Image (tube, rainbow, N blue to C red):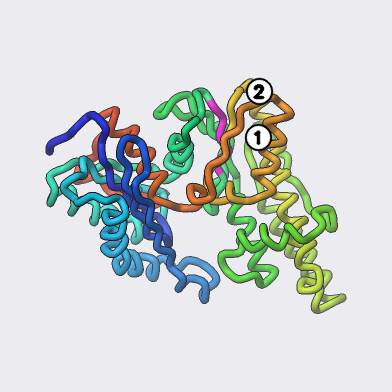
Amino acid sequence: MTQKQDSPCILAIESSCDDTAIAVIANNKILANVVSSQKIHEIHGGVIPELAGRAHLQFIVPVYNKALELAGITAQHLDAIAYTQGPGLIGSLLVGAQFAKGLSLGLNIPTITVNHLQAHIAAHYLSDTPPQFPFLCLLVSGGHTQIVLMYSHSKIEIIGSTIDDAAGEAFDKAAKMMSIPYPGGPLIDRYAELGNPLAYSFPIAKLEGFNYSFSGLKTSLLYFIQKQTKIDPDFVDNNLNDLCASIRYTIVKTLIQTFEKAISKYQIKEIGIAGGVSANRLLRQELLILGQKHQLKVHIPPFEYCTDNAAMIAAAAHQHYLNSQFAKLSDTPFAR
């Protein structure tokens, strides 16, 4: 397959969960970034893997056509096709992988496999002022919470992670307990803006090293709501803003305290956040405060690059292309 090593034009596919997304990157600039969200999961209160896979089959061709149209190119302009290899829902990943391989064969251009978590961090590389290595990144999403030390684009060390629930998962489970519709995390963030973060106290897990735990918060909240609703059946509805503010405060404080420990140990001068939860307003504010406190350069991605999107896949793929890190047609997706 022919490969051009200068200024590649890459089409990137993200299909790890319930968003069908395709982006086009050229000269390390995003020309198109199209996302089609699947609304069907809202009535189920969470993502149904089989329905997600079927929806990707329905949406991927229209999203592909729209991405090319917005980028102002045809398929013949492409130098490579990138896709999310994992982690994620295996059925959803397979749709993106097979579509990418079909394009690769039809256009006689290489494929590039991208790790979904690495891509979240790679979204920072799209900035006009990207982080300088080494930098420390707090990666927070629905399925993962990690502190990652980035020595280079390819040399990465995970120095801390959650031992149970991820931060995003804690937000979603808390939302479900309060009968907040899916997806609950962004709604908690919205309601929290109207509440008192110190109205209720919930436990903050303090572990050795730089690991996290959010299962204790989940259990504490469950018992607290059960106790209060026995006294007042409308307790949650009457105190929703304060509950959301207190939950958000606890989760963000847990994240920041441990992240600050890592900053102090490694003496890093640049920090950032990535992943879906990096769209949380309080977390973004607290990271800026942390940066001022320790005189650090802070990197916060635009909102459109926080949740699942293909621009971040494209950013990671661009680096892989420059290093000639191409995939084989025999490569397969992985769920974990």
Would you say 7 lies left or right of 46 here? left
**Quadrant of the snapshot with the N terminus:** top left
- Identified by mark 2, the residue type is Lys
* 137 falls in the magenta region: yes
Q: Residue at x 63, y 20 (%)?
A: 267
Instruction: Report crowding for label 1: few under 14, some 14 to 19, many 20 or more residues within 10 A (C-alpha).
Output: many
The rendered magenta stretch, by its main secondary structure, is classed as: strand
**Mark sitting on residue 169:** none
- In the structure shown, which secondary structural element does the residue marked by tag 2 occupy? helix
* 219 falls in the magenta region: no
Viewer-nearest residue: 328 or 5: 5
**Mark sitting on residue 265:** 2
* Residue 7 in the image, given as x and y percentages of width and height: 27, 32
Q: Residue at x 34, y 55 (%)?
A: 93
Q: Relative to 54, say whether 168 is above or below.
A: above
* Residue 57 in the image, given as x and y percentages of width and height: 29, 66
- Identified by mark 1, the residue type is Phe
Query: Which residue lies under the disc numbered 1?
Result: 259
Q: Relative to 127, say whether 276 is above or below.
A: below
In three-dimensional space, the C-alpha distance between marks 1 and 2, rounded to whole angstroms, equals 10 Å
* Residue 273 in the image, given as x and y percentages of width and height: 57, 39
Viewer-nearest residue: 263 or 70: 70
Q: Residue at x 63, y 51 (%)?
A: 280
Instruction: Report crowding for label 2: few under 14, some 14 to 19, many 20 or more residues within 10 A (C-alpha).
Output: few
Q: Relative to 223, say whether 84 is above or below.
A: above
Viewer-nearest residue: 123 or 128: 128
Tag 2 or tag 1, which sits nearer the N-term? Answer: 1
| Range covered by the magenta-colored residues | 135-139
